[in-house]
Amino acid sequence: MNQQPSPTCLNCEEPLLGDFCHCCGQQNLPLKQTIGQLLLVFFGEFFNYDGRFLRSIRLMLSQPGAITLAYMEGKRTTYVNPVRFYLFTSAFYFLVINFLPLPSQDPSSNFPLASQVQQSSSEEVAHGFFDGLNEGLAAADSSDDGTLIQTDFENFQAFQANQATLSPEQRASALELRFLEKVYELKEKYGDTTSFTSALGKEVLKRLPQLLLITLPLLALISKLVFFRRKHFWYIDHLVFILYESTSQFFFLFIQYGIDYVALSTEQGWLETIAQLLTLVWIGYYLISFKRFFGKSWGKTLLLFSWLGSLQVLLLLGVFILFMAVSLFNL
């Protein structure tokens, strides 16, 4: 089969005058490609095509907030689109932590910021939660008269049998029944803390990318509401800022993960300290980006940064609680 490039564009059928079509921009490649050529085209868009990817990384890391301002000024071709930049970076990060788990650790524990939490603390939290499931809920308020619902039974069937002996106003509501059914299911399905935390960690890790993608527009909305008086900042401007800053966080997390990996592999504790300090470095980076983007004095920047940060943390906390509930119900 002829593998020579076509004299006309295979996409729009216009005559070609070079390696790229002057009408649609498609590169003139053979009709049948090898796997190597396919991968080269994919990664070439990020690393070779006008150097946009590397140029974007260089500007983003060397001048906090500058890439957002450049995008707002109309330099859309010079740098990578913020959505594509975020999706590629986050996907690459989750790919790495899935297939290259930290030494001597469960892969399910390797989600963003996990390296900043001591392993013993996370085990204590998980152990306490699992013990709560195994012991059963001591009591839950009835939806009708406030009487206590006894839940410490061998299984859910025994609990239902007990419910049948109670008067209608003393029985658990439909929502409480659904929750307690899940509690008993988890008690029967996971016999120890390790298997439970491993399953929960895998479920969280699987859903975390979708959670972050859904949360970003909400974070931008809060930013827009805080700066509602600045009419020249549209919602899309806040969203672009959040996207680029989230992308920068993934770069810091990737570096942090690499340092943690080396630290655990070589048992060099001082490297773990450096990895933890990178969190403070990124917060400083975010603060500088915030000041450069919104153009406020340092006093107003610190005030607004603290206020907006508090609101965004509350949002993240609420979404994370909902997210954990969804993860538990999908175990």
Image (cartoon, grey):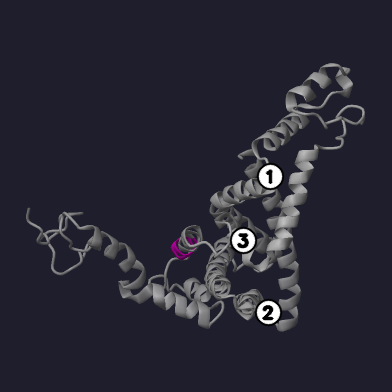
Corner quadrant of residue 92: bottom left
What element does badge 2 sit on?
Answer: loop
Residue at the left extreme, as displayed: 2
State the quadrant of the C terminus.
top right
For the residues bearing labels 2 and 3, Cβ distance under 8 angstroms: no
Badge 1 is on which residue?
192
Q: Name the kind of residue labelled 3 in the image.
A: Ala
In this rendered view, identify the residue nearer to me: 246 or 293.
Answer: 246
Give how far across and how far down residue 316 sits, in percent. Answer: 68, 57
Residue 196 in view (yes/no)? yes
Q: Name the kind of residue labelled 2 in the image.
A: Lys
Q: Residue at x 69, y 61 (%)?
A: 225
Q: Which callout, 2 or 1, points to the residue nearer the camera?
A: 1
Q: Which callout, 2 or 3, points to the residue nearer the camera?
A: 3
Number of marks: 3
Q: Residues within 10 Å of mark 2 (few under 14, many from 20)?
A: few
Badge 2 is on which residue?
296
293 is within the stretch colored magenta: no
Whichever of labels 2 and 3 marks the residue nearer the N terminus, that label is 3
Badge 3 is on which residue?
220
Q: Please report the bounds of the magenta region as a residue range.
A: 84-90
Q: Residues within 10 Å of mark 1 (few under 14, many from 20)?
A: few
Q: Name the kind of residue labelled 1 in the image.
A: Asp
Corner quadrant of residue 39: bottom left
* Image vertical order of residue 239 relative to residue 321, above or below: below
In this rendered view, identify the residue nearer to me: 190 or 57.
Answer: 190
